[in-house]
Image (cartoon, coloured by chain):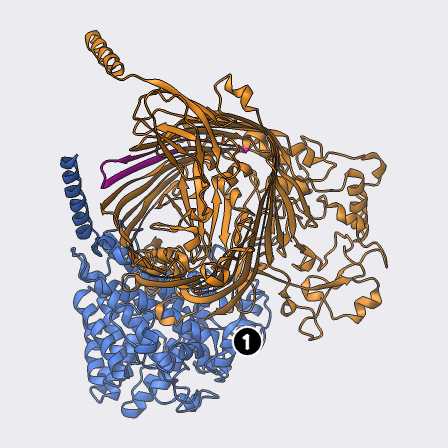
Chain colours: A orange, B blue
């Protein structure tokens, strides 16, 4: 063994002795300005020997032989190759800027396109933006940075899901875009933001190349890879921070609460509950008690590089975030490891492989529901002590002490996931490339939650007399296989043609297993595992499911331009999806785009103002199959089949809800007209689009059909039928301005805005679809109905407060809403003018979809300092205030201090009483304008001077401090105007959303 | 490198080939099943048995046929709490019903649900073979005939299909002819007769006798007296049935006794609610016709629908033991037992005693879960049908009289001695008395052409059939014609 080692060392030694090597050094500068260029990659061609220029553009590269070729490269500049002569020890290079910054290549699905040639509506978010925003989850980087993209967190809890909608909400069911990571189906939820090179968002008919899956828009994620001929670089990014709640609601203190309760009881002729209010003081502030300041930290390590034939990129990361409620009871950890390798096997074959391993851990508390932790914190009276339970049952069945609730919450979720792809490109001739690519995603999750024996007081719904532990294992897999060829050629120097054709096979499959164990030893989380439980229980203690969805697709795309001025493209995709019945499985999705680059025409060519001007338009048919499923076209056997035989109940099997074999996908018709304009030597970059989408064939549940189908049978029901149509129309605008002032100052400003109008244009067979919840036992507040926005709120319109009995008498009776009105009660509008207030007077009182969203983003660099600020605004979105329990003894929001107490005291807030009133009916009193503007991220960075770093062998060291969610401007009374459950019908209802935290971070970026 | 190139080219070619073969549309057919659902069921005897239970289940919702059928007749009035209490019942009582009637809609929907569940099994009848499969299929076909016959009685001819109706059929499959509907009923019942025994494997399941009785009834409705007489006399001669003690016939202990040819089984062991009456395992009709606000012995309270008329009480002679066992005189009962009650709408002083809720510990909502089985086909009914066929068919009056007298004898009455058309009248008369409160009267009057003479508000040429629900006419987009007069 040792001999072999010696031999190898000897061989290497002789090999290295063969050639005479020396060092070369020099300076690299920029051709336009003559300024030195830092960060330029210099590599000896066909080797891995490479260095990077320092801050002054200086470099030294060792072990260079005569005849070697040095390759100088830097992003945004044309690369340069210089051959080293005998004993030439100094080589200076001057790099020219890549005159067309427009040469930027954009991923558009089954290929790339130069930005200037794009004829669809495509937004791009680069790794630079991601770095500046420093998001914990990647979805956050899309908010306010890409026009037409709306991002709403479902909660501020660590690791909570974030909804992304592109150009509004068009479906009554699934509205999330198709996510493709390096071409294969994936999801944004688990990905490490640092692993992403760029994100393309296809917003219009450009996405039709994805056919049946493209209607909600397509997000194309490209992960980082190494670059050829670059020296290995190691980058380490880390931050630590503290998080706190971005908001606490003003609530009544104990004295105010006591006074209000006294008034409320007195108004109903009852004894005063707090005859000595002066003794209660301020009481307990339960918000102070549940919210805490908690830490967050992140580490990220990347190694990139490449030689002539091979590129590589490796990365590992770890994120640890604790919740601002319940600390480690609501936390999130994410660890990832990743590699990306590209190999030029020969001139004809290129192979790429990448894989990402992700591990997530999450614990969570009960949130956004009746009886959730924050709901309880808002409703529990301040007269309660920290450790006091509602043993007298004063607060009804749902409200318990939120601190005990946190203490008795035990759960754990863990996800392990592998995803990645292998791709082989074959280029038999220069113009033709075949790509065979398989992407995969394998994930396994396990979850456990433990419900200890607990008694919060009489009648509480959270009481548990028997300890249980629920466990589940879920396995989700998918692969996406693509096989396609691309032919690109230019004929007669004027006709440029690109043709793409191929096929895609997608399979999603998986299963889940759920089980419950009873009687956990010692009533303790430490022993909470089914393996240790001993109890038995009548009935089924476990369940499982399984799914297998397959898609087979063929597609073709032809892109043509004449002299680079007139651009057209056409796409056609044929999809077959097993989400639909055999007779209705195949769909064709055509689309076309066109563009005209006016700035290439003679009349604009020499313009000093306009650097680039393009008009573009697109039209196409796209589908959304996510709404479909076997449960619609095949009937489940979950009907009731119970009869009496031999005098005993016997259970059999019967058809469930009526199947609709013809159930199909949603079909979107998208039209887009846009303009791209660059002014003043590309310093100002403008893109504007108007668009319209008609989404047809929405699957609507519960459409009445003939009785011959047996829908009247027990456990059966009306089928789900393609019966709805919606329309979204809007306008998008984005402007970016970049300017350098002298050598030291660089400024960038970006602004984008999206205006949307949304309407249900047709629902066949049923008047409306209900959704959401308000209060307890009240009708569902949201509706999907023809002529109204999707998920609009349906309730009573109010007209102030009755000041006097005369006003009450003069107004139509409100008795049918719960009680005859008294002075101090809400006055409802008799919208139909029939002289009585009843359910027929309910009307449109708001909707949760914003009319306009916008982002304003600033960059400012001065010498070694950099500053960025990202802001976001959402206007016209309404929210239902649903965190107030309608119960006589609960605490109240401080706006009740302004309540009606006699004529002229208030025209907004009704009187308080323990008696019956109609004030609790769902009305616009409970609907608030949740428009807001938020300073999402402010970051100040400082890069340490090169001269200092050189001595310790570091290329770059930047330190920064940032604040996320610094401030939110809003009139909304609740915790977080940005939150939503993401439901199309029933979103925007606030049970006490877990607010997004304000995060103070300090971090560093280190390259060497 | 050249060598590698070749290898890669070959590999690529192989890949291409593999996928061009592998990725034909077959790929989409090979999915692992989403679940056990409607299309991959019927893999074992158990599956067939379970699906059969599903068909039987729908029998329980035919309570509405019995209750509303009786209200439609001259035996009873609608009753209830007020003129607006279950408006559909009230309209049928007044013969003012229109195509918009929720309760008639229930009759349509629920009986078609039975047909659909039966057709589901028949669609897969050959999928899996096992010993005893014919028995299950025969029961399914009996049940399909049962529901189809009900639909025919109520609405006239209906659309027919041998498999499940699928969305779209409502606009393409027309209403069949009456003959075709009867032909299907007869062939279903004949299959059941050929494949079932007189005794069922479990109490409550259909038997050969039930199928014969129903076939005889179907022939009688078509006035095919020879066929009716043949199958009914064969049943009387060979079947295991006998008349039972009338005293306990409609009590719990009288359920599934020797007189029971086919009986819809109910229990009070499972709860039910008003949001899904058809989901109840109890006899909803029983609670609905219970005595309003009743408090006293023997009975439980109810909603006082379907109250017998004075005439229905008076038609019995003093010495007819059936009178007080069939129709409860609440004033007399109250005087006797001290029971209290409230008077409802159209109060007559009488209640349908055969199907009053008895004291029992059924679970809530107790009004909807009364356990009284519905005696759908009784041996007395069979005897009277046989008598009618023999007499009206001019086949054998003496045998007809014998059958009639068996029923009269049990009631404590003298033997009838009439013949010819007088015997026909006597049989009609006996039939009404014997079967009062059991839902047969309206259809007996219609099939014998006597409805207009006996039922107030009955319009000949119109009220023989009930209207097809308006929404069904609309769903069919002109495919189904409304019944005459509506």
Horizontal side of B200 relative to A758 (left or right) equals left
Image-quadrant location for residue B225: bottom left
Which region shows up in magenta? A330-358
Q: Position of residue A764 (x, y in %)?
A: 46, 70
Horizontal side of A105 relative to B240 (left or right) equals right
Residue A64 falls inside the magenta stretch: no
Q: Position of residue A325 (x, y in %)?
A: 60, 34
The answer to whether residue B378 is seen in the rendering is no
The secondary structure making up most of the magenta span is strand
Q: Position of residue B177 (x, y in %)?
A: 27, 83
Count the numbered circles shown.
Answer: 1
Horizontal side of A415 relative to B346 (left or right) equals left
| Residue at 55 percent of width and 37 percent of height | A132
Image-quadrant location for residue A387: top right
Image-quadrant location for residue B461: bottom left
Residue annotated with mark 1: B349
* Residue sitting nearer the eye, A300 or A996: A300
Q: Is residue A402 above or below residue B254?
A: above
| Residue at 27 percent of width and 67 percent of height | B119
Horizontal side of A929 relative to A687 (left or right) equals right
Disc 1 is placed on an element classified as: loop
* Residue sitting nearer the eye, A341 or A738: A738
> Label 1 is found on which chain of the structure?
B
| Residue at 69 percent of width and 69 percent of height | A837
* Residue sitting nearer the eye, A639 or B348: A639
The answer to whether residue A386 is seen in the rendering is yes
Q: Position of residue A624 (x, y in %)?
A: 40, 58
């Amino acid at each position: 063994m040792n001999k072999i080692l010696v031999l190898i060392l000897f061989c290497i030694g002789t090999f290295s002795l063969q050639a005479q090597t020396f060092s070369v050094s020099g300076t690299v500068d920029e051709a336009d300005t003559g300024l030195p260029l830092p960060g330029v990659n210099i590599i000896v061609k066909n080797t891995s020997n490479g260095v990077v220029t320092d801050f002054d553009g200086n470099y030294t590269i060792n072990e260079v032989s005569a005849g070697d070729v040095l390759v100088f490269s830097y992003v945004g500049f044309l690369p340069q190759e210089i051959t080293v002569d005998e004993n030439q020890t100094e080589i200076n290079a001057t790099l020219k800027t890549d005159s067309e910054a427009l040469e930027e290549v954009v991923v558009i699905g089954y290929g790339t396109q130069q930005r200037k040639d794009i004829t669809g509506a495509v937004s791009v978010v680069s790794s630079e933006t991601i770095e500046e925003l420093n998001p914990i989850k990647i979805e956050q980087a899309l908010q306010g940075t890409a026009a037409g993209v709306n991002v709403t967190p479902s909660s501020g809890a660590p690791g909570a899901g974030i909804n992304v909608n592109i150009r509004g909400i068009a479906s009554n069911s699934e509205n999330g875009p198709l996510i493709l990571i390096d071409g294969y189906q994936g999801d944004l939820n688990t990905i490490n933001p640092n692993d992403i090179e760029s994100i393309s968002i296809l917003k219009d008919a450009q996405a039709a190349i994805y056919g049946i899956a493209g209607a909600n828009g397509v997000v194309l994620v490209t992960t980082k890879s190494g670059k050829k001929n670059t020296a290995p670089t190691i980058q380490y990014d880390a931050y630590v921070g503290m998080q706190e709640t971005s908001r606490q609601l003003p609530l009544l203190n104990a004295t105010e609460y006591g006074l209000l309760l006294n008034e409320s009881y007195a108004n109903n002729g009852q004894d005063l509950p707090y005859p000595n209010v002066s003794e209660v003081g301020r009481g307990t502030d339960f918000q102070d008690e549940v919210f805490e300041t908690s830490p967050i930290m992140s580490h990220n390590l990347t190694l990139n590089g490449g030689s002539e034939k091979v590129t590589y990129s490796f990365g590992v990361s770890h994120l640890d975030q604790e919740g601002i409620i319940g600390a480690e009871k609501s936390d999130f950890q994410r660890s990832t490891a990743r590699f990306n390798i590209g190999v030029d096997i020969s001139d004809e074959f290129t192979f790429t492989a990448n894989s990402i391993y992700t591990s997530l851990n999450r614990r969570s508390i009960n949130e956004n529901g009746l009886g959730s932790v924050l709901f309880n914190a808002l409703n529990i009276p301040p007269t309660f002590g920290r450790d006091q339970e509602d043993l007298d049952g004063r607060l009804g069945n749902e409200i318990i002490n939120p601190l005990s609730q946190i203490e008795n919450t035990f759960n754990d979720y863990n996800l392990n996931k592998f995803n990645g792809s292998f791709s082989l490109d074959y280029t038999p001739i220069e113009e033709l490339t075949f790509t065979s690519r398989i992407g995969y995603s394998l994930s396994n999750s396990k979850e456990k939650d433990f419900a200890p024996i607990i008694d919060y007081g009489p009648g509480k719904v959270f009481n548990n007399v028997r300890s249980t532990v629920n466990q589940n294992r879920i396995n989700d897999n998918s692969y996406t296989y693509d096989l396609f060829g691309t032919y690109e050629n230019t004929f007669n120097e004027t006709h440029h043609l690109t043709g793409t054709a191929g096929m895609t096979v997608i399979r999603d499959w998986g299963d889940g297993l759920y089980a419950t164990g009873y009687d956990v030893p010692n009533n303790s989380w430490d022993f909470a595992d089914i393996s240790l439980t001993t109890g038995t229980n009548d009935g089924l203690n476990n369940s499982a499911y399984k799914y297998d969805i397959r898609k087979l697709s063929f597609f073709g795309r032809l892109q043509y331009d004449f002299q680079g001025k007139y651009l057209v493209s056409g796409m056609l995709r044929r999809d077959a999806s097993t989400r639909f019945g055999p007779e209705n499985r195949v769909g064709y999705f055509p689309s076309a785009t066109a563009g005209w680059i006016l700035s290439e025409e003679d009349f604009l060519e020499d313009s000093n103002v306009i650097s680039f001007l393009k008009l573009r338009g697109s039209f196409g048919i796209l589908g959304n199959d996510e709404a479909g499923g076997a449960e619609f076209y095949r009937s489940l056997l979950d009907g009731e089949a119970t009869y009496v035989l031999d005098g005993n109940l016997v259970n059999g099997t019967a058809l469930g809800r009526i199947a609709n074999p013809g159930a199909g996908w949603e079909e979107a018709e998208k039209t887009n007209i846009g303009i791209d304009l660059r002014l003043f030597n590309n310093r100002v970059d403008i893109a504007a689009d108007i668009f319209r989408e008609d989404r047809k064939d929405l699957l609507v549940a519960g459409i009445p059909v003939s009785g011959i189908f047996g829908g009247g049978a027990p456990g059966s029901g009306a089928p789900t039928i393609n019966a709805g149509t919606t329309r979204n129309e809007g306008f998008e605008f984005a402007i970016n301005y970049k300017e350098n002032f002298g050598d030291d100052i660089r400024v960038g400003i970006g602004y984008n805005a999206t205006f949307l109008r949304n309407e249900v244009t047709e629902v066949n067979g049923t008047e409306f679809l209900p959704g959401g919840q308000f209060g307890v036992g009240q009708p569902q507040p949201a509706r999907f109905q023809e002529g109204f926005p999707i998920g609009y709120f349906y309730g009573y319109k109010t007209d102030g407060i009755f000041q006097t009995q005369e006003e009450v008498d003069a107004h139509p009776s409100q008795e049918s809403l719960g009680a005859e009105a008294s002075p101090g009660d809400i006055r409802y509008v008799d919208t139909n003018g029939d002289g009585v207030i009843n359910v027929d007077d309910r009307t449109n009182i708001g909707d949760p979809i914003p009319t306009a969203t916008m982002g304003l983003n600033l960059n400012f660099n001065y010498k070694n300092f950099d500053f960025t600020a990202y802001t976001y605004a959402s206007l016209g979105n309404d929210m239902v205030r649903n965190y107030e329990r309608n119960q006589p003894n609960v605490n109240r929001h401080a706006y009740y201090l302004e309540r009606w107490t006699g004529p002229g005291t208030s025209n907004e807030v009704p009187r308080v009483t323990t008696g019956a009133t109609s004030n609790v009916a769902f009305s616009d009193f409970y609907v608030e304008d949740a428009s807001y503007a938020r300073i999402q991220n402010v970051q100040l960075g400082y890069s340490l001077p090169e001269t200092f770093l050189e001595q310790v062998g570091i290329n770059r060291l930047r330190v920064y401090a940032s604040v996320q969610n610094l401030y939110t401007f809003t009139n909304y009374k609740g915790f977080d105007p940005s939150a939503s459950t993401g439901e199309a019908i029933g979103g925007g209802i606030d049970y006490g959303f877990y607010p997004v935290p304000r995060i103070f971070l300090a971090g560093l970026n280190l390259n060497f | 490198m050249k060598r590698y190139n070749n290898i890669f080219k070959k590999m690529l070619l192989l890949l291409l080939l593999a996928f061009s073969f592998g990725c034909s549309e077959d790929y989409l057919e090979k999915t692992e099943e989403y679940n056990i659902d409607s299309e991959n069921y019927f893999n074992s005897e158990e599956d067939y048995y379970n699906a059969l239970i599903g068909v039987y289940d729908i029998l329980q919702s035919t309570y509405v046929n019995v209750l509303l059928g009786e209200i439609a007749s001259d035996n009873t009035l609608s009753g209830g709490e007020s003129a607006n209490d279950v408006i559909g019942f009230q309209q049928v009582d007044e013969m003012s019903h229109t195509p918009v009637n929720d309760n008639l809609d229930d009759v349509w929907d629920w009986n078609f649900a039975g047909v659909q569940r039966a057709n589901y099994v028949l669609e897969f009848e050959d999928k899996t073979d096992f010993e005893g499969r014919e028995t299950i299929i025969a029961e399914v076909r009996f049940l399909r005939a049962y529901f189809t016959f009900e639909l025919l009685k109520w609405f006239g001819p209906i659309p027919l299909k041998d498999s499940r109706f699928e969305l779209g059929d409502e606009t393409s499959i027309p209403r069949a002819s009456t003959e075709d509907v009867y032909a299907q009923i007869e062939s279903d019942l004949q299959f059941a007769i050929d494949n079932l025994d007189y005794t069922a494997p479990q109490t409550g399941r259909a038997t050969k006798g039930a199928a014969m009785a129903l076939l005889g009834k179907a022939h009688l409705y078509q006035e095919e007296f020879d066929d009716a007489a043949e199958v009914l006399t064969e049943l009387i001669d060979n079947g295991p049935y006998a008349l039972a003690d009338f005293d306990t016939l409609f009590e719990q202990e009288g359920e599934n006794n020797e007189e029971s040819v086919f009986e819809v089984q109910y229990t009070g062991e499972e709860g039910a609610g008003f949001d899904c009456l058809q989901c109840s395992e109890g006899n909803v009709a029983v609670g609905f016709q219970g005595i309003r606000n009743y408090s006293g012995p023997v009975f439980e309270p109810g909603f006082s629908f379907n109250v017998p008329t004075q005439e229905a009480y008076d038609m019995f002679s003093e010495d007819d033991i059936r009178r007080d066992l069939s129709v409860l005189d609440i004033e007399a009962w109250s005087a006797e037992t001290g029971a209290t009650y409230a008077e409802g709408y159209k109060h007559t002083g009488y209640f349908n005693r055969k199907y009053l809720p008895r004291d029992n510990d059924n679970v809530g909502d107790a009004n909807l879960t009364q356990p009284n089985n519905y005696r759908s086909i009784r041996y007395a009914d069979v005897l009277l049908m046989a008598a009618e066929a023999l007499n009206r068919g001019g086949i054998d009056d003496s045998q007809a009289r014998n059958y009639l007298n068996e029923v009269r004898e049990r009631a404590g009455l003298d033997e009838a001695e009439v013949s010819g058309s007088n015997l026909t009248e006597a049989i009609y008369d006996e039939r009404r008395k014997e079967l009062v409160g059991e839902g047969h009267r309206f259809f007996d009057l219609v099939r014998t052409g006597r409805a207009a003479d006996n039922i107030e508000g009955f319009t000949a040429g119109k009220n023989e059939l009930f209207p097809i629900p308006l929404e069904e006419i609309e769903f069919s987009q002109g495919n189904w014609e409304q019944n005459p007069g509506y």
